[in-house]
Amino acid sequence: MAGFEPLAEELVRKSLAEAAQEDLSYSHGRIFGSMYTTPHEKALEGHKMFLEANLGNPGLFPGTAKLEREVISILAGLMHHHGADGYITSGGTESNITALWIARKLANGNLDVMVPRSAHFSVFKAIDLLGMNRVDIDLDSEFRMDLTDLENKLSKHQTAAVVAVAGTTELGVVDPIEKIGEMLDGTRIYLHVDAAFGGFVLPFMDKPAPPFDFSVKQVSSITLDPHKMGLSTPPAGGFLVRKPSWLDLTAFSSPYLTQEKALSLLGTRASASVASCWAVLRSLGHVGYVEVVSECMDKTRYLAKRLGEEGFDLVMEPLMNIVAIRTGKRLSSPAEVCKHMATRGWNLSMSVHPKALRMVVMPHINRINIDELILDLLEITHHLRPEVKV
Ligand code: 0PR
């Protein structure tokens, strides 16, 4: 028989419930390996009201389009340049691809992109997709882009762009963006900042963060993702450019739609998350995010302190809500530990530069989860390295 048979309503419902049951949930407090969390309740409420919205065809959804303009204006203010423009993307990957697409258009045939070894793989993907040349920049002793290596490799004649990271995926480190900007001053080299994670952390920290946004005048564009620490529902990435006219460089005529030209890489855009962003930004306000970040940082410091007390070797004092412990006497193989922790329902992840076990302390984590995590971590690392006394 061709095709697929319809199932009884009850069976459809039951199958969906069973599949949902198999998924992990942030609310169980065992996911330490993700930069995502349970979306804010207002985000969920906003999302549900706009399930049909598609800003790929904005003329049909002028209300959603208005919310997007307001979200972009808030994000532009947060990144210290009210004249910036942009749109909500499907995430950091799309934003990073778009940034380098624009950089390539502006680069008069230059194709080299300088990227720190700590960059997220979406940047490598973008370079590959756009047929550009990846030039890896080493990291300094604090895991930031090494300025000397960058200076040696930069070329006014070949470099199209530099990508810097504000909040690396692995360690939450911020590249020396002000210094990089100074190095690029007077050149036409495009500077993109990937603040997919840090963009919703750094502006809300109790200690002022090093300048990483449009306050550094050479910064050309920024990725910052509401669906990570912005507590919005996915998919919601943010993409901002310093000069609104740059958005036209990747625009295509869309004669059969309600707008003359389509700006974004994606056609159909899952736009309920735009309403979700608006709802959470407007509900929490700046002060609400300060509270979210402050709570995450308190729990991060607690986790780091407890791990230190138990003899684990921290890669560094956490700058953001990411803690990493090095491979060494106490921890032989992060991969093995992750695998064993997974059998007990934990989700942890690993970093490569340096080789470490990585934990992200998102808002769904509480202190009890941290205490339980450490107990299991002690048992498992002891079991893997029995010669080390617990
Ligand atoms: N830039 C940075 C600095 C990132 O950390 C990430 C994602 C991206 C760009 C890409 O963003 P999108 O995934 O929104 O396109 N970082 C996480 C990662 O890949 C995302 C993540 C983590 C996804 C854990 C799922 C997950 O379970 O590690």
Image: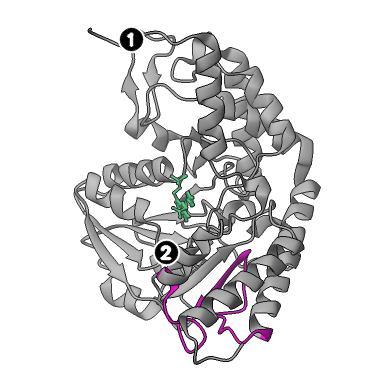
Magenta stretch contains residue 60? no
The three-letter amino acid code for the residue at tag 1 is: Pro
**Quadrant of the frame with the N terminus:** top left
Q: Quadrant of residue 24?
A: top right
> Which dot, 2 or 1, sits closer to the camera?
1
- Residue found 34% across the figure and 7% down from its top: 256
Which circle's residue, 2 or 1, is located before the other in the chain? 2
Q: In the image, residue 301 lies at what x, y percent?
A: 71, 72
Asked which colour scheme the image uses, the reply is one colour
In front: 251, or 321? 321
Relative to 7, say whether 64 is above or below. below
Q: Say which element carries label 1.
A: loop
Relative to 79, say whether 247 is above or below. above
- Residue found 69% across the figure and 52% down from its top: 363
Q: In the image, residue 58 lies at what x, y percent?
A: 50, 15
The three-letter amino acid code for the residue at tag 2 is: Asp
Relative to 312, say whether 78 is above or below. above
Q: Would you say the residues marked 2 and 1 are in contact, meaning their CB atoms lie under 8 Å apart?
A: no
In front: 220, or 46? 46
For disc 1, the marked residue is: 255
- Residue found 29% across the figure and 50% down from its top: 125
Q: In the image, residue 189 lies at what x, y percent?
A: 34, 57
For disc 2, the marked residue is: 185
Q: Say which element carries label 2.
A: loop
Q: Quadrant of residue 124?
A: bottom left
Q: Quadrant of residue 139?
A: bottom left
Is 10 positioned to the left or the right of 149 in the image? right
- Residue found 66% across the figure and 75% down from its top: 304
Q: Which residues are magenta?
A: 309-335
What is the spatial separation of the Cα atoms under label 2 and label 1, in whole angstroms? 40 Å
- The secondary structure that dominates the magenta segment is loop
